[in-house]
Amino acid sequence: MSHHHDLGPSEVGSVVLDLGGDRGALIIHTGRDLHGREIEISRADLDSPRTHSAVRERHVLDGVFHSAVYPDLEAGVYTVWWDENTSAGAISVTGGCIAEFVWPASSPARVD
């Protein structure tokens, strides 16, 4: 996704996650170089719509990190999209839990 935003940092306690039942959350950890970039995800099911979140600087108790947060996801397997056509990987989101995905350091091999 080519959208880019100029967003300020997210402070401790400023993100609310909706966890429980069949709802979970996803955090995609990235490097500083992706600050402002939107990362799309979608359910692994075919024809599933995509949603996106912008990478932001996150100030937390352990320091400063860059990540995209998806706070309210239905449990299931999600595809993380490198770009419009290339998957960066897949992650399973479990109800009541926070799933974490580390953004790849280089472009994944594209399968057509």
Image (cartoon, helix red, strand yellow):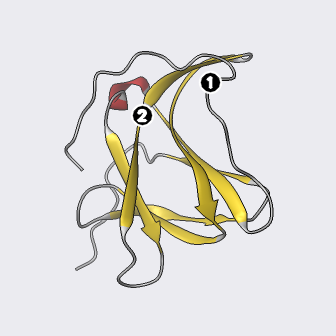
For the residue pair 34 and 110, the one nearer the viewer reads as 34
Tell me which label, 2 or 1, sits earlier in the chain: 1
Residue shown at 62% from the left, 24% from the top: 14
Residue shown at 36% from the left, 27% from the top: 35
Where is mark 2, residue-wise? 55
Residue sticking out furthest to the bottom = 46
Percent across and percent down for residue 63 are 66, 14
Q: Is residue 28 left or right of residue 61?
A: left
Residue shown at 80% from the left, 58% from the top: 20
Q: Quadrant of the C terminus?
A: bottom left
Above or below for 25 versus 66: below
Q: Secondary structure at mark 2?
A: loop
C-alpha gap between disc 2 and disc 1: 15 Å
Tell me how many marks there are: 2
Above or below for 22 versus 35: below
- Mark 2, other Cα within 10 Å: few <14 / some 14–19 / many ≥20: many
Q: Is residue 55 left or right of residue 102?
A: left
Percent across and percent down for residue 82 are 33, 55
Q: Residue 33, labelled with which disc?
A: none
Which amino acid type corresponds to the residue marked 1 in the rendered image?
A: Ser
Between marks 2 and 1 in the image, the one whose residue lies nearer the viewer = 1
Percent across and percent down for residue 66 are 50, 28
For the residue pair 72 and 59, the one nearer the viewer reads as 72
Where is mark 1, residue-wise? 14
- Mark 1, other Cα within 10 Å: few <14 / some 14–19 / many ≥20: few
Q: Is residue 105 left or right of residue 92?
A: left
Percent across and percent down for residue 46 are 39, 85
Which amino acid type corresponds to the residue marked 2 in the rendered image?
A: Val
